[in-house]
Every structure is written in C-alpha cells, then in structure tokens.
Amino acid sequence: MSMSMQGVVAVDYGILGFSKPWFPRQTRTMQFDRSSAQAQSKQAALAALYDQYYNRIANYIFVRMGDRSEAEDLAGEVFLKALQSLGSYKERGVPMQAWLFKIAHNLVVDHLRKTKKRKNVPIEYVEVVSESDPQEIAEANIEFSRVSRALGRLTQAQRQVIELRFFGELSAEETGKVMNKGAGAVRELQCAAIKALRKMLQEEVDTGNGGI
Amino acid sequence: MNRTFDEILDDCVDRLNRGDTVQDCLRGHPEHASELEPLLRAVADTRAAYKFTPSAEARRTARQRFNARMGELETRGQAKRPLLPRILSLSPAWAAVTAAVVVALLGYFAVRPALTPGPVPEPVAEGGFSFLISDEVNAIGDFDSLEVTISSIGLHLSGEGGGWIELEPEEEVVDLKLLPGKKAQEIWAGNVTEGRYTKVFIYVSEATGVLSETGEVIDIKLPSGKLQISKPFDVRSGEETTFVYDVTVVSTGQGQAADRYNLKPQIGESGPDQEFELVGGKGQGEPGGGQGDVNGPGANHHEGNRNQPGTPVSLKPD
C-alpha cells in the first residue's frame, strides 16, 4: 500500500506490515510533522544561545538603562519574548543572535517609554570594583560618570554601534543586521563613533569633569 | 590586499572583545599604532567603565523561567499535534483498530450521499493574501525610530456571507523609520476567503517615537486607535494578493512634541497595486539587503513561495 499527500513523499509500508515496526520515528517526524520539527529546531537553537548571550544582552541593556537589576530582568525577558515570537522568526540571513538584540532594543525602548526616562544612570549602580577599597570605588564612579557623559553626547547611531559592538560583542556583520546597515557602513560608523568618543572623553578631562 | 583603517580598527575591537589587550592589538598593526592607540584606549576605558556581569542568582532565575516556558510550549505543541502523526505514533494494535474505525467511517460517508441525496455544501474557496505596511515620507525625518504596534487587521468582505475578517499580525511592531517610500514590511500572510474586499483597517495599540533632535521618547496618540481606508480589492482562489497599507506620520507643527504628530493612512499609496520593496521586520533582516523582492505593478497577484500561512481570527457578520 502506498500513500501520497501534499508535501509528503510516497511511502510503501507493506500490507498489514504490523510484524515489523511501524515506520521509523524519525521518518514519520520528517514527513508528517515538519512544522513541529522546525519549531523544535528553532527552540533548540535559541536555548543554545542562552548561555552565550544572556550576559552580553544584560550588559547591552545596562549601558542603555544604567540599572543593573532592570538589565538582568529585561535580559531574561528578551529570551522569553524570543521564545514567544519564534514562529515569526525566519532567518533570511539574519542570525538569531542579531534578532535577540533587536528584541532587546525594542524592549528597552518600550521600557523607557513606560518609565518616561530617557536615561537613568545612578552612580550607586556602578559595578563595585573592590568592596574593600573605597578609593577604587570612588575612582570607578568618576570614570563611569565621565564615560556616561561622553556617550550621551554621541549621536543615536554612534551610540548604538558602540553599544552593540563593545557590550553586545556582536561582529560588524551582526551589528549591521540589527541596524539595517551593511558591514562596511557599520565599520565606517564605528570608526567615526570611536573618534568622537575619544574626543568627548578628552574634553571631559580637559574641563575637569573627569579623569583619575 | 590593503585593508582600510576602518577594517583594522574593527579587527582591534573584535580582539578586545575576545580578551586581547590594547598592546596586543597595537603589536598586530605597528604601522598604525600611533593612530590606533588613543582610539583603542577610549574603547577600553568605555568597556571597563560599563562592564557589568549579571549576578548568578539573576541568571539562574531567568534560565529557570525560560526553561519552564519552553516546557509549556512543548506540552502545548504536543497537544496541538495534527491527528495523522498522532495516529501513526500509536502501537500497531491501536493503529489497526483506528484504521478499521476510519475505514468504516469513510465507507459510511461514501455510501450515505447515494442513500440520502441532498445538497452538498461547497468548501469555501480561499486565496493567498499578504499584508504589508509601508510609510510615505512626511515627518518621519524628525524621528530616529517610530515603532507602531498593530494589534489586529480587519478586512471587510462584501456580498452574501460577508463581514469583517480579523487577522492577527505575526509581526506586531513595525518601525516606520525603516519603511520609507516603496519599502514595505510583511506583517501577515496566509489564506483568506475568496471575494471582494471593500475596507481595510488596522488597530494601533501603541505608537512610540524617538525624536532625532532631542532624543525624547514620545507617544503618538490615535483618537480611535484605528486607521481605516476604503480601497476595494479582490482575492482570487489560487492566486496571491499582496496589499500594501501605507501609514504616515504628519506634523501639525503645534503644541508639545507628544501632541504635534499624528498617524494617518495614505489611501493613495495603499492597495494591491502598489510597487513595493519587501524588507524584513525586527527579526527579519535588513532592508534592501538582497533578501526581499521588488514587485512592480501587476505583481500583486502571483504564484510563489508563501510563508507559513496565518489563520484569520474571525469572520463577523455585518
């Protein structure tokens, strides 16, 4: 007996072939449960990225929001949102990690809109370098303020390329997928951003607003 | 091959990301060391100032939530498995019983029409339908991004048995900044009932813009939360209809930033006969990056690869 249906290869599994195993599980899955297999494959890919990208996404969010606790929470939300939206994810040349950063960007924008704060960078959230060395903490706080002010003076695009490259640790190609630019344009933008950042950091020192 | 300074700097940023020091990078590019050093110091200072490692507790909690959610989805997926795979995964004995029941039922329904002749309801014909969002350039230049959340799409089917068909977008959030002119993003694709449609609306639950000049984040209000146009079009069985819905942001030039902008549908730029350049959504890639098609006029009805079809949520009578 053979059977054929749309999108399914005809299979001959013998008349009353019950003495043999019904056909192999993997064959059945491939033939009749393709969408389910695709969904599971995407879920597995996302799960595999979790360990590699959770910290980077949290860091990326922290730079944009300046709040460690919120960054940790939102990084978790990014993966939940991704899981929920996996059905609509089609690779089409966009790696899943770049897609995660797009989700992170959207969540941050949404969060900032809800809290009506563009940027909130309380000094007490600065990573404590060494709890036993108050001077080191003070210096870290001064440096954090200096960098924060310098980043705040960059254009949106310059800031975004820095956030994605330095903190998200995405490649130029992946950054391009998030920013809807080619890799060459990202490199060019990055170079301009770093030059501007360097100038701003120097100005912060020159005006006595920072420097250790 | 000579590498540009942009590429060398990019390579150094990659190396710093991998844990190399500024000195390591400079040693790799001695001819550019003097130009690179101050820039790489700025990169290193910035990374160091913001370096943050999430706590183990936060990471563990987030992972547990993720795993739990994935388990839920898998359970739901099992429950939703189509009938045929479930039958085929039964043991041979149960499969034999099931097959016998199916054969009996098929036999009954095959003989039944001959015994009780009567009208047989015709299946509803369907045609492929894709719904795209685009943006005519008006005040979009004022924004760095303008994200519009579309919670549903309504199509009005005319004629007997017609009514409103509601579609749930696969991609809810579109950034109009990325869709100027002919660029358009697909938010729904699937099959809808064949026939003539006369009206199309989209429900906009949120519209949030980031102003370029000030970086201010503003909400754009829609009094009714709905944008509607009357633009008749046909969906025909065996063909695919692509409808481009153009939404534009306009400035009234008055009031506070949040009150100064309105969203409006552009009927002249909307419809099934619009030229468009397909670009990806937030998870779909870059506009103009070679992954979209450019369809000219007349390409609105076409055969082709379809995405996983969506399902209309409901058909409400008039």
Image (spheres, grey):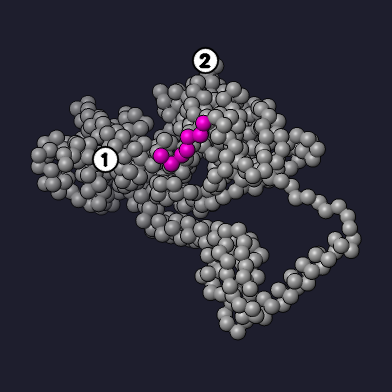
Helix, strand or loop at mark 2: loop
* B189 or B9: nearer the viewer: B189
Tell me: residue A58, above or below residue A198: below
- The CA distance from mark 1 to mark 2 is 39 Å
Q: Which residues are magenta?
A: B290-296
Q: Determine whether B21 is above or below B3 in the image.
A: below
**Which residue is found at the position 37% from the left and 31% from the top?**
A156
Q: Is residue A51 above or below residue A151?
A: below
- The part of the image, by quadrant, that contains residue B250 is top right
Could you tell whether B270 is left or right of A115 in the image?
right
- Which residue bears the numbered disc 1? B46
Indicate the chain on which mark 2 is placed: B
Name the residue tied to disc 2: B253
From the top left corner, tell me how far across and down residue B86 is, in percent: 63, 68
Residue B238, quarter of the rendered image: top right
* Res. B127 visible in picture: yes
B270, above or below B87, in the image: above
| Dot 1 and dot 2 within a common chain | yes
Kind of residue at badge 1: Thr
Q: Residue at x 51, y 52 (%)?
A: A86
